[in-house]
Amino acid sequence: MNSILSSVKGRKWFSLPLIIPLILIIIIGLVTLYSTLILPTGGLGDTSILTKQILFIIVGCILFIVISYLDLSYLKFWQVQLIIYLITIVLLIAVLIFGPTIKNVKRWLVIGGVQIQPSEIAKLTVIVLTAFIFSLKKKYNEWVLFLFSFFLMLPIFFLIYKEPSGSMAFLTLAIWFIIAFLGLNNPLRNSILLSIIGLTVGAFLLTSVVGNNIWYLLLIPAAIIAIFGFYTKNNWKTFVIISVLLALFVGGLTSITWNKVLKPYQKDRIIAFVNPEETTDDIGFNVNQSKIAIGSGQIFGKGFGNGTQSKRNFLPEFRTDFIFASYAEEFGLLGGVFLISLYAAIIVICFIAAINSSTDTIQSLLCVGIGIKILLEVFINIGTNTGGIPATGIPLPLMSAGGTITVMTLLELGVVHNIILRNNQKIRTENADIITTYED
């Protein structure tokens, strides 16, 4: 009885290094959203979006707490994984059949007056499913698992793309690939293979978009790396040859996709980024207004409630896709750096949790996958806001107004929090055992 009481007393119920930056980002997001409601003439506009966001955060926090103390070992059962996968597929199909058309796209299901975006749920499904599959490495060949996870991910990719949501589809694909890549053995060899494929595909894509001979700047290093990998170790030769053939195939497919598959507005976004001087003003309008808003904030910002770009409707989607610009306009460069630092802290904590869980493949890959997901979302959103990458519709986690991404982000971090607490408890138990043994 005494041992049980001492175990409960010694247990930590929260991990402050994760909780503190999480709470600060939530507060910053709500403050920024409230600021966008202040009218130029004074007073507040429609506050329903703020009320909804607060409710979503409350639901997300409840899920965060519940998930933090659940037994995640159930994720190691294939029956549970199958149920999660099938539910996700059904939701994505339901969007295409029953989802309302909003701004010429079908991305949401409306249930009880609440919009649910299944593609956000699908990202977590891909993380959980891929982590589970690569936890079976001791039983099955890793490349068989790689292909198996790829074929399971493809329906999710195509269903999201058909909404249409190209940016979300390719983000989901990127999340899968990074987790699968990290799940494979021999990281040095895999880095060489990834470099060959990435550089070659990039060369094909660049020559398709730009239309000149600059592609060789990428193809030459790809060839050098391929030669290096081929002659480094004999057992790498087959992998290098396969990666070269795969790179050429995917590169050719990329060119065909650019010329035959991508819609004009998707091409326009990429062209506006690569060669903005030769595009019409309206294509890069959103990004230009975002850059103006961020630049006008300068070092210290204009102050809370004093943003002009959003309040005078120059900045589009200033509560969702471009909320970082709204925030940076009022809180400046220092505020932006502080916010990015908070995200960086959460991402690093996810990766540290993955390292501490290295003996449990599924938990380790879950932490890596969630960290990578948040990293890519932050990078893409802020990159879009600053004009660093082509415009996409990826919201900023816990900052952008939106129910599904807010709830899902908090749920995902609840998974990481769960793993951190279990790792801490395991370390404390091991230390107690060592002390007990020493005293005996």
Image (cartoon, rainbow, N blue to C red):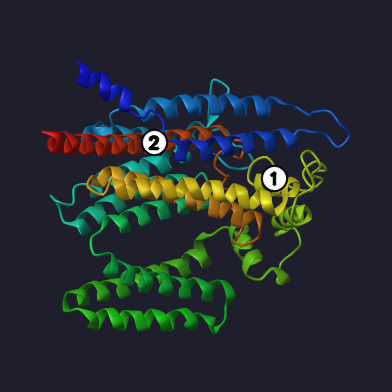
Residue corresponding to mark 1: 327
- State yes or no: discs 1 and 2 in contact (Cβ < 8 Å): no
Which residue lies at the image location 19% right of the left edge and 36% below the top edge? 435
Number of other residues with Cα within 10 Å of mark 2, as a class: few under 14, some 14 to 19, many 20 or more: many
Comes first in the chain, label 1 or label 2:
1
x then y, percent, for residue 426: 25, 37
- Seen as rendered, the residue at the extreme front is 439
Q: Is residue 75 visible?
A: no
The image quadrant of residue 294 is bottom right
The residue type indicated by label 1 comes to: Tyr
In the rendered image, the quadrant that contains the N terminus is: top left
Q: Is residue 385 left or right of residue 421?
A: right
Which residue lies at the image location 67% right of the left edge and 48% below the top edge? 335
Q: Is residue 125 visible?
A: yes
Q: Is residue 111 left or right of residue 126?
A: right
Q: Nearer the viewer, residue 257 or 156?
A: 156
Label placed on residue 417: 2
The residue type indicated by label 2 comes to: His
x then y, percent, for residue 80: 26, 32
- Seen as rendered, the residue at the extreme top is 1
Which residue lies at the image location 43% right of the left edge and 51% below the top edge? 372
Q: Is residue 226 left or right of residue 318?
A: left
The image quadrant of residue 299 is bottom right
Helix, strand or loop at mark 2? helix
x then y, percent, for residue 384: 62, 56
